[in-house]
Image: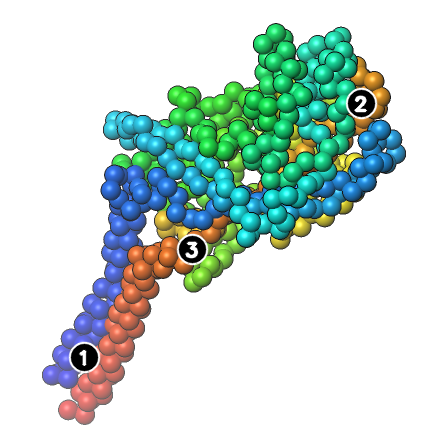
Amino acid sequence: MQTRTKGIIVTAVGVLILVVGVLLGWVILPKIIESQVKKQTQLKEGSDIYEKWLKIPVPIRMKFTYFNVTNAAELQDGFGDVKPILKEVGPYSFNETRVKEVLGRNEKKDTIVYRAYTTFHYDKETSVGDENDVVTILNMPLYVVLHLLTQHVPIFAQLVIDLFLSEEKLLHTVNAIEVSVSGVEASDYVPVINIAKFILKIEIPSEFQGSKFGLWLPRNGTDDGIFEVGTGISDSAQFNVIKSINGESSVTAWDGEYCNMINGTDGMMFPPFVKKSTVLYAFGAEICRSIYLHYAEEMEYKGIPGYRFKLPRSAFENPHINGDNMCFCTPVPSPFNNSCNAAGGIRMHTCKQGAPVILSKAHFLDADEEASAGVIGLNPSYELHDSYIDIEPNTGFPIGAYKRIQASIEVQPLKVFRHPFNKFPHMFFPIVWVAEEGALDDDLVDEIKSRLLTPLKIANIAKWTLIGLGCFIIIVGAVILVIARKSAKYV
Protein backbone atom coordinates (compact mmCIF):
# COMPACT_ATOMS: atom_id res chain seq x y z
CA MET A 1 0.00 0.00 0.00
CA GLN A 2 2.91 2.30 0.76
CA THR A 3 4.37 1.69 -2.70
CA ARG A 4 1.00 2.43 -4.30
CA THR A 5 0.78 5.71 -2.38
CA LYS A 6 4.22 6.66 -3.61
CA GLY A 7 3.14 5.87 -7.16
CA ILE A 8 0.07 8.07 -6.86
CA ILE A 9 2.10 10.93 -5.40
CA VAL A 10 4.78 10.67 -8.10
CA THR A 11 2.13 10.53 -10.86
CA ALA A 12 0.30 13.51 -9.37
CA VAL A 13 3.54 15.51 -9.27
CA GLY A 14 4.18 14.60 -12.92
CA VAL A 15 0.68 15.68 -13.92
CA LEU A 16 1.11 18.91 -12.00
CA ILE A 17 4.43 19.67 -13.71
CA LEU A 18 2.89 18.79 -17.10
CA VAL A 19 -0.05 21.13 -16.47
CA VAL A 20 2.31 23.89 -15.33
CA GLY A 21 4.37 23.41 -18.53
CA VAL A 22 1.27 23.58 -20.72
CA LEU A 23 -0.12 26.63 -18.91
CA LEU A 24 3.29 28.31 -18.92
CA GLY A 25 3.96 27.59 -22.59
CA TRP A 26 0.54 28.26 -24.12
CA VAL A 27 -1.11 30.70 -21.70
CA ILE A 28 1.13 32.51 -19.21
CA LEU A 29 4.30 33.18 -21.26
CA PRO A 30 2.41 34.21 -24.43
CA LYS A 31 0.42 36.68 -22.35
CA ILE A 32 3.60 38.06 -20.78
CA ILE A 33 5.30 38.38 -24.18
CA GLU A 34 2.19 39.95 -25.71
CA SER A 35 2.06 42.46 -22.87
CA GLN A 36 5.74 43.35 -23.31
CA VAL A 37 5.37 43.71 -27.09
CA LYS A 38 2.37 46.01 -26.61
CA LYS A 39 4.42 48.17 -24.22
CA GLN A 40 7.27 48.31 -26.73
CA THR A 41 5.01 49.40 -29.61
CA GLN A 42 3.64 52.59 -28.14
CA LEU A 43 4.57 56.06 -29.35
CA LYS A 44 5.42 57.43 -25.90
CA GLU A 45 8.07 60.08 -25.51
CA GLY A 46 11.34 58.63 -24.27
CA SER A 47 10.58 55.07 -25.34
CA ASP A 48 12.96 53.21 -27.61
CA ILE A 49 10.38 52.65 -30.35
CA TYR A 50 9.45 56.34 -30.25
CA GLU A 51 13.04 57.34 -30.96
CA LYS A 52 13.23 54.86 -33.85
CA TRP A 53 9.91 56.14 -35.17
CA LEU A 54 11.14 59.75 -35.09
CA LYS A 55 14.25 58.92 -37.08
CA ILE A 56 14.20 55.59 -38.87
CA PRO A 57 17.45 53.82 -37.92
CA VAL A 58 17.32 51.33 -40.80
CA PRO A 59 19.68 52.29 -43.64
CA ILE A 60 17.42 53.09 -46.63
CA ARG A 61 18.61 53.54 -50.20
CA MET A 62 16.78 54.85 -53.24
CA LYS A 63 18.19 53.38 -56.45
CA PHE A 64 17.38 54.78 -59.89
CA THR A 65 17.86 52.49 -62.90
CA TYR A 66 17.23 54.20 -66.24
CA PHE A 67 16.12 52.75 -69.56
CA ASN A 68 18.73 54.26 -71.87
CA VAL A 69 17.59 54.52 -75.51
CA THR A 70 20.34 53.04 -77.67
CA ASN A 71 18.84 53.86 -81.09
CA ALA A 72 17.98 57.51 -80.40
CA ALA A 73 19.18 58.75 -83.81
CA GLU A 74 16.57 56.61 -85.56
CA LEU A 75 13.77 57.96 -83.38
CA GLN A 76 14.30 61.72 -83.27
CA ASP A 77 12.17 62.32 -86.38
CA GLY A 78 9.37 60.05 -85.25
CA PHE A 79 8.98 56.43 -84.32
CA GLY A 80 7.47 55.14 -87.55
CA ASP A 81 8.06 51.41 -87.63
CA VAL A 82 11.09 51.66 -85.35
CA LYS A 83 10.73 50.71 -81.69
CA PRO A 84 12.91 52.23 -78.97
CA ILE A 85 15.65 49.81 -77.95
CA LEU A 86 16.26 50.09 -74.21
CA LYS A 87 19.24 49.12 -72.11
CA GLU A 88 19.46 49.50 -68.35
CA VAL A 89 21.92 52.06 -66.97
CA GLY A 90 22.65 52.28 -63.25
CA PRO A 91 21.52 51.94 -60.59
CA TYR A 92 22.36 55.37 -59.17
CA SER A 93 22.02 55.12 -55.43
CA PHE A 94 20.97 57.74 -52.88
CA ASN A 95 20.99 57.41 -49.11
CA GLU A 96 17.54 58.29 -47.80
CA THR A 97 17.02 59.98 -44.44
CA ARG A 98 13.57 60.25 -42.85
CA VAL A 99 13.03 62.49 -39.82
CA LYS A 100 9.71 63.35 -38.18
CA GLU A 101 8.78 66.64 -36.53
CA VAL A 102 6.05 66.13 -33.94
CA LEU A 103 3.43 68.89 -34.03
CA GLY A 104 1.14 67.69 -31.26
CA ARG A 105 -0.94 64.93 -29.70
CA ASN A 106 -4.63 64.19 -29.28
CA GLU A 107 -5.00 62.20 -26.09
CA LYS A 108 -8.71 61.54 -26.61
CA LYS A 109 -8.16 60.07 -30.07
CA ASP A 110 -4.89 58.42 -29.00
CA THR A 111 -3.07 59.97 -31.96
CA ILE A 112 0.09 61.91 -32.69
CA VAL A 113 0.47 64.57 -35.38
CA TYR A 114 3.69 65.15 -37.32
CA ARG A 115 5.47 66.13 -40.51
CA ALA A 116 8.04 63.76 -42.01
CA TYR A 117 10.97 65.22 -43.93
CA THR A 118 12.87 63.13 -46.48
CA THR A 119 16.28 63.95 -47.91
CA PHE A 120 18.43 62.16 -50.47
CA HIS A 121 22.21 62.17 -50.77
CA TYR A 122 24.08 60.56 -53.66
CA ASP A 123 26.10 57.50 -52.63
CA LYS A 124 28.87 56.79 -55.11
CA GLU A 125 30.01 53.60 -53.36
CA THR A 126 26.73 51.75 -53.90
CA SER A 127 26.10 53.19 -57.38
CA VAL A 128 27.04 51.65 -60.70
CA GLY A 129 28.54 54.64 -62.51
CA ASP A 130 29.49 58.13 -61.37
CA GLU A 131 28.23 61.69 -61.16
CA ASN A 132 29.02 62.43 -64.81
CA ASP A 133 26.99 59.60 -66.36
CA VAL A 134 24.36 60.61 -68.90
CA VAL A 135 21.28 58.77 -70.14
CA THR A 136 19.18 59.21 -73.27
CA ILE A 137 15.50 59.03 -72.43
CA LEU A 138 12.19 60.42 -73.61
CA ASN A 139 12.14 64.20 -73.17
CA MET A 140 9.68 64.18 -70.28
CA PRO A 141 9.44 67.96 -69.77
CA LEU A 142 8.65 68.44 -73.46
CA TYR A 143 6.11 65.65 -73.72
CA VAL A 144 4.34 66.64 -70.50
CA VAL A 145 4.04 70.25 -71.71
CA LEU A 146 2.77 69.09 -75.11
CA HIS A 147 0.26 66.83 -73.40
CA LEU A 148 -1.08 69.62 -71.15
CA LEU A 149 -1.32 72.11 -74.03
CA THR A 150 -3.23 69.57 -76.11
CA GLN A 151 -5.79 69.23 -73.33
CA HIS A 152 -6.23 72.88 -72.43
CA VAL A 153 -5.34 75.14 -75.40
CA PRO A 154 -5.17 72.99 -78.55
CA ILE A 155 -5.70 75.99 -80.86
CA PHE A 156 -2.59 77.82 -79.63
CA ALA A 157 -0.50 74.78 -78.73
CA GLN A 158 1.68 74.73 -81.86
CA LEU A 159 2.26 78.47 -81.64
CA VAL A 160 3.51 78.16 -78.06
CA ILE A 161 5.96 75.45 -79.09
CA ASP A 162 7.18 77.44 -82.13
CA LEU A 163 7.83 80.48 -79.97
CA PHE A 164 9.53 78.88 -76.98
CA LEU A 165 10.48 75.23 -77.52
CA SER A 166 11.25 74.86 -81.22
CA GLU A 167 14.75 73.52 -80.51
CA GLU A 168 13.62 70.77 -78.13
CA LYS A 169 13.96 67.16 -79.30
CA LEU A 170 11.77 64.12 -78.74
CA LEU A 171 14.62 62.39 -76.88
CA HIS A 172 17.24 64.14 -74.82
CA THR A 173 20.46 63.21 -73.06
CA VAL A 174 20.65 64.27 -69.42
CA ASN A 175 22.78 63.72 -66.36
CA ALA A 176 21.48 60.66 -64.50
CA ILE A 177 22.10 62.08 -61.03
CA GLU A 178 20.50 65.44 -61.77
CA VAL A 179 17.33 64.12 -63.43
CA SER A 180 16.83 61.79 -60.44
CA VAL A 181 16.85 64.23 -57.53
CA SER A 182 18.55 67.63 -57.90
CA GLY A 183 16.94 68.43 -61.27
CA VAL A 184 18.16 69.09 -64.81
CA GLU A 185 18.16 72.55 -66.32
CA ALA A 186 14.76 73.38 -67.81
CA SER A 187 14.97 77.18 -68.09
CA ASP A 188 13.60 77.10 -71.67
CA TYR A 189 10.33 75.85 -70.21
CA VAL A 190 9.93 78.67 -67.69
CA PRO A 191 8.04 81.05 -70.07
CA VAL A 192 5.67 78.26 -71.12
CA ILE A 193 5.17 77.14 -67.52
CA ASN A 194 4.45 80.70 -66.41
CA ILE A 195 1.91 81.22 -69.21
CA ALA A 196 0.24 77.91 -68.35
CA LYS A 197 0.22 78.51 -64.61
CA PHE A 198 -0.60 82.21 -64.30
CA ILE A 199 -2.54 83.02 -67.46
CA LEU A 200 -4.19 79.76 -68.46
CA LYS A 201 -4.53 78.58 -64.82
CA ILE A 202 -3.23 75.11 -65.69
CA GLU A 203 -1.93 73.04 -62.76
CA ILE A 204 1.73 72.19 -63.41
CA PRO A 205 3.38 68.93 -62.25
CA SER A 206 5.49 69.44 -59.15
CA GLU A 207 8.49 67.88 -60.91
CA PHE A 208 8.97 71.37 -62.39
CA GLN A 209 10.60 73.52 -59.70
CA GLY A 210 11.75 76.96 -60.84
CA SER A 211 14.11 76.36 -63.77
CA LYS A 212 14.67 72.68 -62.85
CA PHE A 213 12.97 69.39 -63.66
CA GLY A 214 13.62 66.26 -61.60
CA LEU A 215 11.76 63.04 -60.87
CA TRP A 216 12.28 63.19 -57.09
CA LEU A 217 13.01 66.93 -56.98
CA PRO A 218 9.72 67.78 -55.19
CA ARG A 219 10.38 65.13 -52.53
CA ASN A 220 13.97 66.07 -51.60
CA GLY A 221 14.18 68.02 -48.36
CA THR A 222 10.40 68.36 -48.21
CA ASP A 223 7.47 66.74 -46.46
CA ASP A 224 4.26 65.08 -47.69
CA GLY A 225 1.95 67.03 -45.41
CA ILE A 226 0.64 66.79 -41.86
CA PHE A 227 0.03 63.19 -40.79
CA GLU A 228 -2.05 62.00 -37.86
CA VAL A 229 -1.43 58.40 -36.76
CA GLY A 230 -2.42 56.12 -33.91
CA THR A 231 0.03 55.86 -31.01
CA GLY A 232 -0.84 52.26 -30.09
CA ILE A 233 -1.12 53.19 -26.40
CA SER A 234 -4.76 52.21 -25.93
CA ASP A 235 -4.91 49.78 -28.87
CA SER A 236 -1.76 48.21 -30.28
CA ALA A 237 -3.61 47.40 -33.53
CA GLN A 238 -3.65 51.16 -34.26
CA PHE A 239 0.10 51.64 -33.85
CA ASN A 240 1.34 53.99 -36.63
CA VAL A 241 -1.92 53.58 -38.56
CA ILE A 242 -2.71 56.75 -40.52
CA LYS A 243 -5.91 58.51 -39.45
CA SER A 244 -5.66 61.61 -41.62
CA ILE A 245 -3.36 63.60 -43.90
CA ASN A 246 -3.73 67.38 -43.82
CA GLY A 247 -6.91 66.85 -41.83
CA GLU A 248 -8.51 64.59 -44.44
CA SER A 249 -9.24 60.89 -43.95
CA SER A 250 -9.16 60.22 -47.70
CA VAL A 251 -7.59 61.59 -50.88
CA THR A 252 -9.40 62.98 -53.92
CA ALA A 253 -7.16 61.74 -56.73
CA TRP A 254 -9.32 58.83 -57.82
CA ASP A 255 -12.79 58.19 -59.13
CA GLY A 256 -14.36 56.44 -56.17
CA GLU A 257 -14.46 56.11 -52.39
CA TYR A 258 -12.63 52.77 -52.30
CA CYS A 259 -9.59 53.99 -54.24
CA ASN A 260 -9.43 57.25 -52.28
CA MET A 261 -9.23 55.52 -48.88
CA ILE A 262 -6.10 56.06 -46.80
CA ASN A 263 -5.32 52.62 -45.40
CA GLY A 264 -2.47 51.35 -43.26
CA THR A 265 0.78 52.92 -42.12
CA ASP A 266 3.54 54.82 -43.89
CA GLY A 267 5.25 51.49 -44.59
CA MET A 268 8.08 52.08 -42.13
CA MET A 269 6.47 50.31 -39.14
CA PHE A 270 3.37 48.13 -38.77
CA PRO A 271 1.19 47.13 -35.81
CA PRO A 272 2.38 44.05 -33.88
CA PHE A 273 1.12 40.46 -34.03
CA VAL A 274 1.15 40.02 -37.80
CA LYS A 275 -0.42 36.78 -39.02
CA LYS A 276 -0.16 34.98 -42.33
CA SER A 277 -3.76 35.98 -42.98
CA THR A 278 -2.96 39.66 -42.38
CA VAL A 279 -3.15 42.06 -45.34
CA LEU A 280 -0.50 44.75 -44.93
CA TYR A 281 -1.52 48.22 -46.09
CA ALA A 282 0.82 51.16 -46.67
CA PHE A 283 0.04 54.62 -48.01
CA GLY A 284 2.41 56.25 -50.50
CA ALA A 285 2.01 60.01 -50.76
CA GLU A 286 4.02 60.10 -53.99
CA ILE A 287 1.45 57.83 -55.66
CA CYS A 288 -1.64 59.25 -53.89
CA ARG A 289 -2.89 55.83 -52.81
CA SER A 290 -2.55 52.91 -50.45
CA ILE A 291 -1.10 49.65 -51.66
CA TYR A 292 -1.52 46.24 -50.11
CA LEU A 293 0.69 43.20 -49.69
CA HIS A 294 -0.26 39.55 -49.17
CA TYR A 295 1.61 36.85 -47.29
CA ALA A 296 3.87 34.85 -49.61
CA GLU A 297 6.25 32.70 -47.55
CA GLU A 298 8.28 32.28 -44.39
CA MET A 299 11.82 33.63 -44.46
CA GLU A 300 14.83 34.22 -42.23
CA TYR A 301 17.25 37.12 -42.08
CA LYS A 302 20.45 36.80 -40.04
CA GLY A 303 18.78 34.36 -37.68
CA ILE A 304 15.52 36.32 -37.36
CA PRO A 305 12.50 34.36 -38.65
CA GLY A 306 9.84 36.36 -40.43
CA TYR A 307 7.03 36.51 -42.96
CA ARG A 308 7.46 37.79 -46.49
CA PHE A 309 4.59 39.84 -47.93
CA LYS A 310 4.46 40.64 -51.64
CA LEU A 311 2.67 43.15 -53.83
CA PRO A 312 0.16 40.95 -55.67
CA ARG A 313 -0.73 41.11 -59.35
CA SER A 314 -4.24 42.16 -58.35
CA ALA A 315 -2.97 45.60 -57.28
CA PHE A 316 -2.41 46.54 -60.94
CA GLU A 317 -4.87 44.10 -62.48
CA ASN A 318 -7.18 44.94 -65.37
CA PRO A 319 -10.18 46.65 -63.70
CA HIS A 320 -12.52 44.53 -65.79
CA ILE A 321 -11.02 41.49 -64.02
CA ASN A 322 -10.47 43.04 -60.58
CA GLY A 323 -13.42 45.37 -60.14
CA ASP A 324 -11.78 47.05 -57.12
CA ASN A 325 -9.40 48.75 -59.55
CA MET A 326 -12.16 50.35 -61.62
CA CYS A 327 -12.01 53.58 -59.63
CA PHE A 328 -8.32 53.86 -60.53
CA CYS A 329 -9.42 53.98 -64.17
CA THR A 330 -9.89 57.75 -64.12
CA PRO A 331 -11.18 59.55 -67.23
CA VAL A 332 -8.47 60.82 -69.55
CA PRO A 333 -9.31 64.23 -71.05
CA SER A 334 -10.12 64.33 -74.74
CA PRO A 335 -8.67 63.63 -77.27
CA PHE A 336 -6.63 60.88 -75.59
CA ASN A 337 -7.28 57.15 -75.44
CA ASN A 338 -9.35 56.35 -72.36
CA SER A 339 -9.07 52.55 -72.32
CA CYS A 340 -8.24 50.64 -69.13
CA ASN A 341 -8.30 47.18 -70.67
CA ALA A 342 -4.72 46.16 -69.85
CA ALA A 343 -3.22 44.74 -66.66
CA GLY A 344 0.04 45.84 -65.13
CA GLY A 345 -0.10 49.62 -64.99
CA ILE A 346 -2.18 52.45 -63.56
CA ARG A 347 -2.55 55.94 -65.00
CA MET A 348 -1.33 58.57 -62.54
CA HIS A 349 -2.41 61.79 -64.29
CA THR A 350 -4.93 62.66 -61.55
CA CYS A 351 -2.11 62.32 -58.99
CA LYS A 352 0.58 64.02 -61.11
CA GLN A 353 -1.22 67.24 -62.10
CA GLY A 354 -2.19 65.93 -65.52
CA ALA A 355 1.16 64.36 -66.47
CA PRO A 356 0.59 61.10 -68.41
CA VAL A 357 2.61 58.93 -66.00
CA ILE A 358 2.07 55.16 -65.81
CA LEU A 359 2.89 53.38 -62.55
CA SER A 360 3.78 49.68 -62.74
CA LYS A 361 6.10 47.06 -61.40
CA ALA A 362 9.65 47.20 -62.77
CA HIS A 363 10.02 45.95 -66.34
CA PHE A 364 6.21 45.66 -66.48
CA LEU A 365 6.36 42.57 -64.29
CA ASP A 366 2.89 40.93 -64.09
CA ALA A 367 1.64 43.16 -66.92
CA ASP A 368 -0.08 42.13 -70.14
CA GLU A 369 2.19 41.87 -73.18
CA GLU A 370 0.71 44.98 -74.76
CA ALA A 371 2.19 47.12 -71.96
CA SER A 372 5.72 46.44 -73.19
CA ALA A 373 4.87 45.90 -76.88
CA GLY A 374 6.08 49.35 -77.93
CA VAL A 375 9.71 48.89 -76.84
CA ILE A 376 12.51 46.35 -77.02
CA GLY A 377 14.76 45.36 -74.13
CA LEU A 378 12.56 44.65 -71.11
CA ASN A 379 13.21 41.44 -69.17
CA PRO A 380 10.86 41.12 -66.18
CA SER A 381 12.07 38.92 -63.33
CA TYR A 382 10.35 38.15 -60.02
CA GLU A 383 13.72 37.88 -58.31
CA LEU A 384 14.95 41.27 -59.53
CA HIS A 385 11.80 43.33 -59.99
CA ASP A 386 9.12 42.24 -57.52
CA SER A 387 8.21 44.30 -54.45
CA TYR A 388 8.06 42.73 -51.00
CA ILE A 389 8.55 43.38 -47.32
CA ASP A 390 9.86 41.01 -44.65
CA ILE A 391 8.20 41.36 -41.24
CA GLU A 392 9.10 40.12 -37.77
CA PRO A 393 5.53 38.99 -36.94
CA ASN A 394 5.50 39.57 -33.17
CA THR A 395 6.53 43.23 -33.29
CA GLY A 396 5.44 44.12 -36.85
CA PHE A 397 8.91 45.61 -37.34
CA PRO A 398 10.23 45.35 -40.92
CA ILE A 399 13.32 43.18 -41.25
CA GLY A 400 13.81 44.29 -44.85
CA ALA A 401 11.79 46.10 -47.50
CA TYR A 402 12.20 46.17 -51.27
CA LYS A 403 9.83 48.46 -53.18
CA ARG A 404 10.46 48.40 -56.93
CA ILE A 405 8.25 50.67 -59.01
CA GLN A 406 8.57 51.79 -62.62
CA ALA A 407 7.60 55.17 -64.08
CA SER A 408 6.66 55.31 -67.75
CA ILE A 409 5.11 57.96 -69.96
CA GLU A 410 1.96 57.10 -71.87
CA VAL A 411 2.73 58.38 -75.36
CA GLN A 412 -0.20 59.11 -77.68
CA PRO A 413 -0.59 60.94 -81.01
CA LEU A 414 -0.64 64.70 -80.42
CA LYS A 415 -2.65 65.65 -83.48
CA VAL A 416 -2.69 69.40 -82.82
CA PHE A 417 1.07 69.49 -83.48
CA ARG A 418 3.13 69.00 -86.59
CA HIS A 419 5.43 66.08 -87.36
CA PRO A 420 6.77 64.13 -85.52
CA PHE A 421 4.42 64.68 -82.58
CA ASN A 422 1.24 63.99 -84.52
CA LYS A 423 2.53 60.57 -85.60
CA PHE A 424 3.28 59.09 -82.20
CA PRO A 425 2.06 55.53 -81.65
CA HIS A 426 0.00 54.83 -78.55
CA MET A 427 2.51 53.17 -76.22
CA PHE A 428 4.01 53.10 -72.75
CA PHE A 429 7.56 54.52 -72.82
CA PRO A 430 9.57 53.29 -69.77
CA ILE A 431 11.79 55.96 -68.21
CA VAL A 432 13.14 54.56 -64.95
CA TRP A 433 12.50 51.99 -62.29
CA VAL A 434 13.16 52.95 -58.71
CA ALA A 435 14.11 50.57 -55.92
CA GLU A 436 13.61 51.77 -52.36
CA GLU A 437 15.43 49.24 -50.20
CA GLY A 438 16.31 48.85 -46.56
CA ALA A 439 17.32 46.06 -44.19
CA LEU A 440 18.26 45.81 -40.52
CA ASP A 441 21.92 46.38 -39.77
CA ASP A 442 23.81 44.13 -37.33
CA ASP A 443 23.11 46.34 -34.31
CA LEU A 444 19.35 46.23 -34.88
CA VAL A 445 19.50 42.47 -35.52
CA ASP A 446 21.27 41.96 -32.19
CA GLU A 447 18.72 44.20 -30.45
CA ILE A 448 15.74 42.21 -31.75
CA LYS A 449 17.45 38.95 -30.83
CA SER A 450 18.23 40.05 -27.28
CA ARG A 451 14.87 41.69 -26.58
CA LEU A 452 12.56 39.24 -28.30
CA LEU A 453 14.07 36.09 -29.74
CA THR A 454 16.23 35.14 -26.76
CA PRO A 455 13.31 35.39 -24.27
CA LEU A 456 11.15 33.42 -26.72
CA LYS A 457 13.81 30.69 -26.96
CA ILE A 458 14.19 30.53 -23.17
CA ALA A 459 10.41 30.33 -22.78
CA ASN A 460 10.22 27.59 -25.40
CA ILE A 461 13.00 25.59 -23.74
CA ALA A 462 11.35 25.98 -20.32
CA LYS A 463 7.99 24.93 -21.73
CA TRP A 464 9.23 21.72 -23.33
CA THR A 465 11.54 20.95 -20.40
CA LEU A 466 8.61 21.07 -17.98
CA ILE A 467 6.41 19.06 -20.34
CA GLY A 468 9.15 16.48 -20.85
CA LEU A 469 9.91 16.30 -17.13
CA GLY A 470 6.19 15.99 -16.30
CA CYS A 471 5.74 13.15 -18.82
CA PHE A 472 8.83 11.37 -17.47
CA ILE A 473 7.62 11.61 -13.86
CA ILE A 474 4.14 10.40 -14.90
CA ILE A 475 5.76 7.37 -16.53
CA VAL A 476 7.83 6.73 -13.38
CA GLY A 477 4.67 7.01 -11.26
CA ALA A 478 2.84 4.62 -13.58
CA VAL A 479 5.67 2.09 -13.30
CA ILE A 480 5.56 2.34 -9.51
CA LEU A 481 1.80 1.76 -9.55
CA VAL A 482 2.21 -1.30 -11.78
CA ILE A 483 4.84 -2.69 -9.45
CA ALA A 484 2.60 -1.98 -6.45
CA ARG A 485 -0.32 -3.81 -8.08
CA LYS A 486 1.80 -6.86 -8.85
CA SER A 487 3.18 -6.88 -5.34
CA ALA A 488 -0.36 -6.73 -3.89
CA LYS A 489 -1.31 -9.98 -5.68
CA TYR A 490 1.25 -11.95 -3.68
CA VAL A 491 0.37 -10.52 -0.30
Residue at 78% x, 42% y is 70
Q: Residue furthest bottom?
A: 490
Of the two numbered discs 1 and 2 on the same chain, state the one appearing first in sequence: 1
* Mark linked to residue 278: none
How is the model colour-coded?
rainbow
Badge 2 vs badge 3, beta-carbon distance below 8 Å: no
* Mark linked to residue 421: 2
Residue at 41% x, 59% y is 442
Q: Indicate which label's residue lies in the foreground, 3 or 1.
A: 3
Residue at 59% x, 16% y is 203
Q: Give the spatial CA distance, label 3 vs label 1.
A: 55 Å
Image-based side of 350 in relation to 339, left or right: left
The kind of residue on which mark 1 rests is Gly
Helix, strand or loop for disc 3: loop
**Against 314, is 124 above or below?**
below
Image quarter of residue 168: top right
Q: Give the spatial CA distance, label 1 vs label 2.
A: 96 Å
Of the two numbered discs 2 and 3 on the same chain, state the one appearing first in sequence: 2
Q: Residue furthest right?
A: 81
Of the two numbered discs 3 and 1 on the same chain, state the one appearing first in sequence: 1
* Mark linked to residue 441: 3
Image-based side of 92 in relation to 84, left or right: left
Q: Give the spatial CA distance, label 2 vs label 3.
A: 50 Å
Helix, strand or loop for disc 2: helix
The kind of residue on which mark 2 rests is Phe
Residue 112 is situated, as x and y percent measured from the top left of the image, at 31, 31
Q: Indicate which label's residue lies in the foreground, 1 or 2.
A: 2
Residue 132 is situated, as x and y percent measured from the top left of the image, at 64, 43
Helix, strand or loop for disc 1: helix
Residue 425 is situated, as x and y percent measured from the top left of the image, at 81, 28
Badge 1 vs badge 2, beta-carbon distance below 8 Å: no
Residue 243 is situated, as x and y percent measured from the top left of the image, at 39, 28
